[in-house]
Amino acid sequence: MSGVTPGRRAGWIGHAVLALFAAGSLFPLVWTAIAASRNTTRLAQTPPPFWFGGNLLRNLRIAWTDANMGTALFNTVLVAGTVAAGTVLFSTLAGFAFAKLRFRLKNLLLLLVIGTMMVPPQLGVVPLYMLIAELSWTDRLQSVVLPTLVSAFGVFFMRQYLLQALPTELVEAARVDGASSWRVVWHVVFPAARPAMAVLGMLTFVLAWNDFFWPIIALTQNGNPTVQVALTGLGRGYIPDQSVIMAGALLGTLPLLLAFVIFGKHIVGGIMTGAVKG
């Protein structure tokens, strides 16, 4: 018989497959850094470069200056953080109401909320822009924060989670003990929903960070740009400098990686806790 057991062989195969997927996932980021360290002439050659050059700091400095990246990063952190916090809060409250409270037309209202997910966001651009223009919010951050403070997906996601993770008896026991609605939410609903809130917050933060369609309409590059709006100013000209564009994309990606490194373990731990409790 062979010295390697079937279970150990299966473990090595699983680790090899995971390593291949990890390498494939990291390759675009690594190649972006490689392209940011080269120049446009070298990037246009065949085959393209697959190792780092010596222009990384120069290209990062140009991208930081030309794209007003300092202001853009601050604005994006503010916008994405506010949108994530608002979406988590309001979606949890609405999800709890749809999951555990009794009120008239609950199912109809839930269907209407879910139905909004099927409406293309492009259909609301013209009336939304007319509204922010009437409020004098053009090129101001509230124009991209307030329309996205709650999402139908977030409401549905939290509702589905709380249906399973929050026992109805626990809510009723808190009511019997004389707890008000806000005490029930704070001491019962939020602790039970913490794993799903962490996941929804991370997903919403990433989506808000990468949002381009509405911010490019509501904001300008020279005013209050987000990262995605600021990056549109790079590479303009008769021959775009692809290496500077890649450097700007790298600057816009690094904060997301840093956030995942800091909070990723807590999010995964919250998911596992919720799975065990379920």
Image: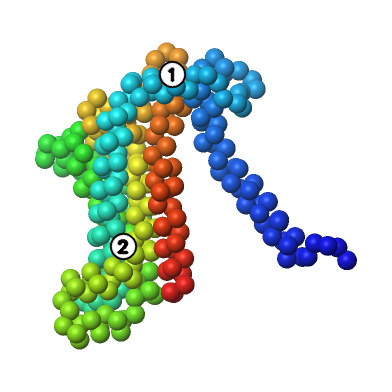
Q: Please report the residue visible at 31 percent of the width from the left and 73 percent of the height from the top.
A: 99
For mark 2, does the 10 Å Cα neighbourhood hold few (<14), some (14 to 19), or many (20 or more) residues?
A: many
Q: Which residue type does callout 1 highlight?
A: Arg
Q: Quadrant of the N terminus?
A: bottom right
* Discs 1/2, front: 1
Mark 1 residue element: helix
User: Which residue is farthest front?
Assistant: 3
Relative height, residue 202 to residue 134 (above, below): below
Tell me, yes or no, if residue 156 can be seen here.
no
| Position in image of residue 34 (x %, y %) | 54, 27
Distance between mark 1 and mark 2 Cα atoms: 45 Å
Q: Name the residue under label 1.
A: 58
Q: Please report the residue visible at 55 percent of the width from the left and 40 percent of the height from the top.
A: 26
Q: Which residue type does callout 2 highlight?
A: Val
Q: In which quarter of the image is the C terminus?
A: bottom left
> In the drawing, does residue 56 fall left or right of residue 194?
right
Q: Mark 2 points at which residue?
A: 155
Q: Please report the residue visible at 54 percent of the width from the left and 14 percent of the height from the top.
A: 41
Tell me, yes or no, if residue 260 can be seen here.
yes
> In the drawing, does residue 26 fall left or right of residue 112?
right
Relative height, residue 237 to residue 269 (above, below): above
In which quarter of the view is residue 232 placed? top left
